[in-house]
Image: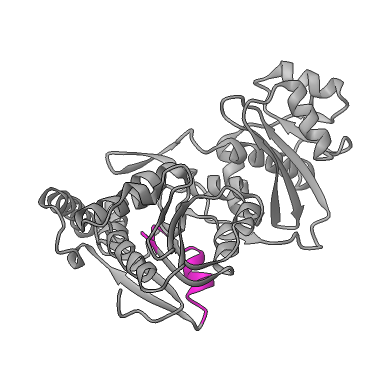
Amino acid sequence: MLRMTGNKKVIQGSTSSGKTYGIIPILYDKALSKPRTKITVVAETLPALKDGCIDIFKNFMMDEGRWNDAQWNGTDMVYKALNGSTMQFKSFDSVGKAKAAGKRDILFLNEANHIDYGIADALIIRSNEVWMDFNADMEFWAHTEILTQPDSEFLKLTYLDNEGIPEAVLNNLMQRKAKAEAEERNGTKGYWWNWWQVYGLGEVGMLQEAVYPRWEILSERPERFTRFVYGLDFGFQHPTALVKVWFWEDELFLEEVIYKSGLTSNALIDEMRKKEVSREVEIMCDYARPEMIEDLDNAGFYVLKADKSVEAGINFLNQMKVYVHADSINIQRENRLYKRKVMNGIISEQIDKKNDDAMDAARYAAMEIKSAFYGGSAYESF
C-alpha cells in the first residue's frame, strides 16, 4: 500500500487481509508528516465506525505508545495530533450532510461498498487524496465510477498477505475453503464457492442472496418519466416509507418521499402535506393498518389497497430497468441489504424481513403499475 501513488487508492480484498489495519497507520503517519493535515475516516454507520476503524486506530496508537487521552475528543470522534493535524471519524446519512462537512486533505472510505455513491461522491470531490477498502461481494461504484478514472490505482489483497492472521481465523477460512472446493467438484459453484471468491480470494463476486441487483443511481429524473404512483408502507418503530415510483415503458425511477420512524397518523399527514404529496395520484397502502388508512382518506389523499404479492412484485421489479435518485439514500441502502435467508449455505425462498420498508413500498407501487398500466386487473379501492 505504501507504494501506491494514485490520487484515488482502491483496495479490494478478502476478509482478514489486513486492509484497514494497514491503511490506518499510513494515514496517521501522513498526519504527522505535515502540520494541520485534515483526515476524515468514513464508514456507513456510527456503530460500524466504533467497532471498526476507531477500535483499530486506538489499538494501533496504544500498541505504539502514541495514544494520549487528552488529544481524543470522544464526542466529536476526533484525534488531534500535536502538530495540529486531525483524524476525524464520521458517518453520513444524507448527501447534504456530506457536502456540508466541507473539504479535507485525505479521505478514507472504510467498507466503501456499504456507502451510498451520492454520499461518497460528495466527499470524494472535496478531498485531495482518497483511500477506500472493501470486500467486493458484487461490482459497485468503485469499479464503475472510480477505477475508470485516470488518477485511480487498484490493489487486491488476500488473507495470504496478512502475516499476523490469527490461527483460529485461518482455520475457519480453511473450513470454508473446503466447502467451496466441494461445491466446485460437484459442479454446483453455489453459496460457498461464491463466498470463497469474495472473502477468501478477494475477487468480485455475486451476492447470490440479494433479492434485487444493484439499481443504477441518477442525480436527476430523466424527462421521459412523466407518470408515477406512490407506495406506502406503515411503520412506527420501523420507518414509515413513502416511495414515488415513476414509470416509462420497461423502466422505473424511484424517489424517496418519506422515510421516518415514530410517525402517528397526524404526523404522517403533516409530513405528506410538507412534501406536497399529490391528492390526485394513487397511494398504494399496506392494508395492515386500517386506522392509518382511514385517517389518510379523511385527509383527502387517494389511498388504495396494495397488492402485497411478494414474489410477483419482486419478479416484476426484476424485469424492469430500475433507477434510484441519488438523494434517496435509504432506498439505495435497502436495495443493497435486502436479501433472502441463507440456511446452512443454502439460499432459501424466504425473504429476510430486514431492510424492507422502502422495498415493500416500492413493490406496492410497482404492482399497481403492472396491474393498471401493463394489462392486469383493476386495483381494489377501500
The image quadrant that residue 198 belongs to is bottom left
Horizontal and vertical percent for residue 228? 79, 47
Whether residue 378 is visible: no
When the figure is inspected, residue 321 is found, relative to residue 228, above or below; the finding is: below
Residue at (67, 19) in percent of width and height: 289
Whether residue 174 is visible: yes
Q: Quadrant of the C terminus?
A: top right
In front of the other: 86 or 200: 86
The image quadrant that residue 261 belongs to is top right
In the image, which residues are magenta?
Answer: 133-149
- Residue 225 is left or right of residue 184, and the answer is right
- Residue 149 is left or right of residue 165, and the answer is right
In front of the other: 129 or 61: 61
Q: What colouring method underlies this structural image?
A: one colour
In front of the other: 250 or 116: 116
Horizontal and vertical percent for residue 61? 26, 55
Horizontal and vertical percent for residue 298? 86, 20
When the figure is inspected, residue 334 is found, relative to residue 131, above or below; the finding is: above
Q: Quadrant of the N terminus?
A: bottom left
Residue at (49, 43) in percent of width and height: 338
- Residue 168 is left or right of residue 373, and the answer is left
- Residue 12 is left or right of residue 309, and the answer is left
When the figure is inspected, residue 317 is found, relative to residue 295, above or below; the finding is: below
In front of the other: 81 or 18: 81
Q: Is residue 311 magenta?
A: no
Horizontal and vertical percent for residue 310? 57, 36
Residue at (52, 38) in percent of width and height: 355
Which residue is farthest bottom?
A: 150
Residue at (84, 31) in percent of width and height: 302
